[in-house]
Image: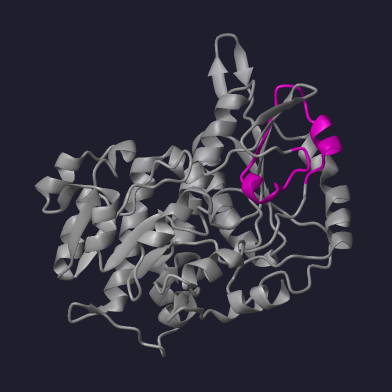
Amino acid sequence: MIVGVPTETYPGERRVAIVPNALSLFEKLGVEVCIEAGAGSRAGFPDEDYAARGATTGLSRAEVFERADVVAQVRGFGANPEEGRADLERFRSGQVLVSTLDPLGNPQGANELAKTGVVSFALELLPRISRAQSMDVLSSMATVAGYHATLLAATSTSTMWPLLMTAAGTITPAKVLVVGAGVAGLQAIATARRLGAVVDAYDVRPAAREQVESLGGNFIELELDTGDSEDSGGYAQAMDESFYERQREMMTQIVAAADAVITTAAVPGRAAPVLVTESMVRGMRPGSVLVDLAAETGGNCDATVAGETRDLDGVSVIGPTNVPSAVPADASNMYARNVHSFLANLIEDGNVSLDKDDPIVQETTLTRDGSVTNDRVKELLAGD
């Protein structure tokens, strides 16, 4: 079996689906790997490193698709709707695609992908079960995003973050507020604490308190009726607008006291909830910063502009996009191991085996035999 790795074409994408150090893992599966020329160069992995570890390199994009039984991508069509369209004609019926595909945000992309006859697996749809943890690309990439967002905030504020005793006097530690205590938020808390900041954190899920406090953060609890704030997969659920309005009212003073705010709240397949308003940002001290990790899905702050940094009365509002790509080497390493774990569960005796009773296979299969097969995505398409 051959796994093909094409160069990522999403604008600004620097990651690659498989890295040289992971090739030995794929070899143990009885899998050969072929790489498009230069596919890993933007992540710091030249073709020579792949060749030295047994991969076939120097291929054109067309050759990779022709040879591959399985195509592994970081952002396949759906998650790359414009540049990725050129790959639709390269797929053949029965070929397997393993990638992030944004099926909940772009279900129409799944329809178009289905027409190629490709058997596609959307890694965003992995069930949150213990056996799938090593395959969880969302958690891996959120870890990178939380780390990088914190460094971005630290280098954008007008203050240093740790408590320092100097000949010129004492420098007090910065106050950081992290909104959303999922994987990205927890990594942001841990990184900010290592930098010496005092960290407050808020999450709509009361169960997040223990995780926040285990990292040295202070959990902020607002007197709100959270109800069913968590879905069966462990993700925060969207609440109604009246809830968010009350939440924003209570958070105004908390935001104003922070030197840096890092927002990470996201609901899969939905626009990000607005938790911080422009008026709240303008109430922050000049020289402070807000980094909005939800910028790509509309932002947790209504002043956020994706891909831009705005100045609001001296407060910087940063809307970074595709944040894991800013740390491409380690992000690619983590992604490659996720892909390996996923394929290890899928491959049996050198072939892809589709065990329909396996919840991992069942929930991640997006298209097969010319149709969209995932129930969640089919419901979204039916509602259009």
Place of residue 158 in the rendered image (x, y in percent of width and height, measured from the top left): 64, 20
Q: Which residues are magenta?
A: 276-303
The structure residue drawn at horizontal position 68% and vertical position 30%, both measured from the top left corner, is 289
Q: Taking 187 as reference, is 246 left or right? A: right
Q: Residue furthest bottom?
A: 357
Quadrant in the rendering for residue 172: top right
For the point 69% across and 57% down, the residue is: 203
In this rendering, the count of numbered labels is 0
Q: Is residue 339 above or below residue 51?
A: below
Between 22 and 255, which is closer to the camera in this rendering?
A: 22
Magenta span contains residue 11: no
Quarter in which the C terminus is drawn: bottom right
**Is 356 positioned to the left or the right of 155 in the image?**
left
The answer, for residue 320, to whether it is visible in the render is yes
The answer to whether residue 162 is visible is no
Residue pictured at 65% horizontal, 57% vertical:
266
**Residue 24: percent from the left, percent from the top?**
16, 59
Q: Nearer the viewer, residue 65 or 260?
A: 65
Q: Residue at the far top: name it.
A: 168
Residue lying furthest front: 89
Up the image or down, 240 lies above or below 152; here it is: below
> Which residue is painted at 29% across and 43% down in the image?
40
Residue 2 locus on image (x, y percent): 20, 65
130 left or right of 67 in image: right
Which image quarter holds the N terminus?
A: bottom left
Q: Position of residue 205 (x, y in %)?
A: 69, 64
Seen in the picture, residue 373 relative to 124 is either above or below; the reply is below
The one nearer the camera, 123 or 206, is: 123
Taking depth in this image into account, of 233 and 41 the one nearest to the observer is 41
